Amino acid sequence: MLLLSCTNVSRGYGATPLFDGVEFEIHAGERVGFVGPNGAGKTTLLRILAGLDEPDSGKVTLHAGARLGLLQQVAEFPTGRTLFEEAKSAFDELLAMQREFERVAEELATSTDAVKHRQLSEKFDRLTEVLRHHDAFELDHKVEGVLAGLGFRAADFGRDANTFSGGQQRRLLLAKLLLSAPDVMLLDEPSNHLDIGTTRWLENYLAQQPEGMLVVSHDRYFLDKVTNKTFELHARKITSFPGSFKQYVRLRDEKYERELKEFEAQREYIEKQEEYIRRAHYGQLAKQAQSRVKVLDKIERLEKPTKVSGPDIAFSEVARSGDIVFHAEDLTKRYGDKVLFDKLSFDLPRGKRLGIMGANGCGKTTLLKILLGEEEPTSGEVHRGHLVFPGYLDQHLAILDPEKSVMRAVWPDDDPQQTEQKMRDLLGSFGLQGEIVEHPIKSLSGGERSRAALAKLTVNGANLLILDEPTNHLDIWACDSLEQALKAFEGTCIVVSHDRYFLNRVADLMIVFKGEPPAGSPVPPPGFADGTTEVVYGNYDTYELLRQAREQADKAGGKREPTGEATSGRRSGAAEASGDAKPAKRKRKFPYRKVPDLEADIAATEQKIADLETALQSPDVYRDATRVRDTMTELEKAKDALAQLYQHWEEAVELNG
């Protein structure tokens, strides 16, 4: 069902329009990711769709009485209203209908007039049907579920809404929007201020909703999990791509390559015709030449295609280090009663990229300082390999002097080999060109400062890059450029990041801090971290598959630890078996099956998932909301079945004789 349409909409400030002649539609069941470079006009368009701003031309139409809701950025709550009351106010219309239902019920119970009794009875039935349709008799349960999912504790439900932090108040605004369930949701950075666990909950919640939605986000993993369509705002136009964010990236690149070939073919054809016309514009061939002039005049000239791209980032060659960059054995760090990590052991080979992930305050930066020798562990050892030259990029970019120009801040100390041209070439490889290299560091944007800091690391010859939240100030395309540069880097890399998409593309192995603060806590309280870490030999998807498998095993009633270092990493800080006794062989959870049979089922299920994801790329699917929901439901079931098959296969490999 068509919910919203945008027809020939234009908006600009001054002589240059942000977007011009924009047209698109949003149907029920479409979860649209909205991407584009910073400053392209995404937020302006959202405001126009929400009726908070007017277009210079064109029209926005809500169809079939559809309701639209926008996730607000600034919270304004009435004084004295509790968290629970404010969240429940999303149901004001239903609550008013409930009060009317109760009034009608009371009148019906005391009515003696036959005509009035019949009228009241009919109204009572209508109200009952509407309230049941909207589950209006379960409103408190709905509110509790959404608030808990977004990280609020039951103990906080009675607190005044105005006493919460800014980030928590924005989560309350998100809760109200989700509870009100408008037909079209406009979500501007909905995962901001959410930890990974809460973000997972929101991803699952949104992916199951039947409403249409338009989602602006820099979180590419979030977009990939939630959206089934993508709008790209570029060069003042919107282009629509079916499928998830990953499919958008592939289809966008294919479209660009196809259009570039068409442009070059047309240009080559025109050049050949123009050369013929120049040679034959007189004499016996003049008529043919004139005919070709007329043909060229009728040709619709193609413009050279462009695509959104990030800055060119490239690290220079570095000296080779020893084969093992770090060897950590039984590392433990405590502050009083608070255990950050306990008996953490790992090796980091040369050329590998280690990702570190965990909640704020769990000990990630402390681990970096211990590896760098700036802090001592409570117990355990760290051995740094031979000829390892680390370069550390902290979150605050402290390696740059804010008062110096970009060139002088990056220029290495006491290096007579450097010249201004070499420095300009280096900065250019990080997308910093022209006059900007003479500007002071403090005048740059966050993304520009980040790229200048990365240039500083490479000019110092670091063959071990240690990057603490390097994507914080980068947009989607700058993140992509950094990922490509890190994969091409010849040295070794350690990255601390909350960006799951980034970790997925970059990490070869990961350390995951498992301790998380209690839900709804704005600042991790002392003692929340339990010191449990897990080393995962793979990227974020590997970790997520293991986490889901354990979660499903726990739900089935069997608590299960990772079964082997090669597949699931090692969990440090857990109780160890005493002595050298062999662990008891676990009991079967699944019926006996041969490993090859399970592998065949896994291959078939993976193919089914691929087929369903391909089906979701077809525009025809999105014309039928029921078909969209059925396809997505089947896809989720297939993914659940695959996770179950992996568990069964793992058990068969271990227990089959």
Image (cartoon, grey):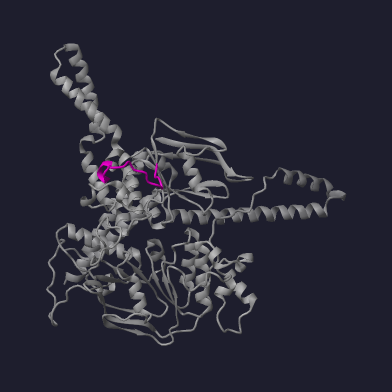
Q: Nearer the viewer, residue 143 or 552?
A: 143
Q: Position of residue 252 (x, y in %)?
A: 51, 54
Give the residue at x 32% y 58%.
195
In the rendered image of this protein, does residue 401 appear above or below residue 246?
Answer: below
In the rendered image of this protein, does residue 612 appear above or below residue 461?
Answer: above
Residue 101's image quarter? top left
* Left or right side of 481 for 82: left
Q: Nearer the viewer, residue 597 or 400?
A: 400
* Left or right side of 278 for 626: left
Asked if one can make out residue 20 in the rendered structure from this viewpoint, the answer is no
Q: Nearer the viewer, residue 527 or 561?
A: 527
Q: Position of residue 359 (x, y in %)?
A: 31, 64
Quadrant where the C terminus sits is bottom left
Give the residue at x 63% y 79%.
419
Asked if one can make out residue 635 in the rendered structure from this viewpoint, the answer is yes
Residue lying at the far bottom in this picture: please name it. Answer: 386
The range drawn in magenta is 70-85
Q: Position of residue 565 (x, y in %)?
A: 26, 74
* Left or right side of 379 for 41: right
In the rendered image of this protein, does residue 499 appear above or below residue 6?
Answer: below
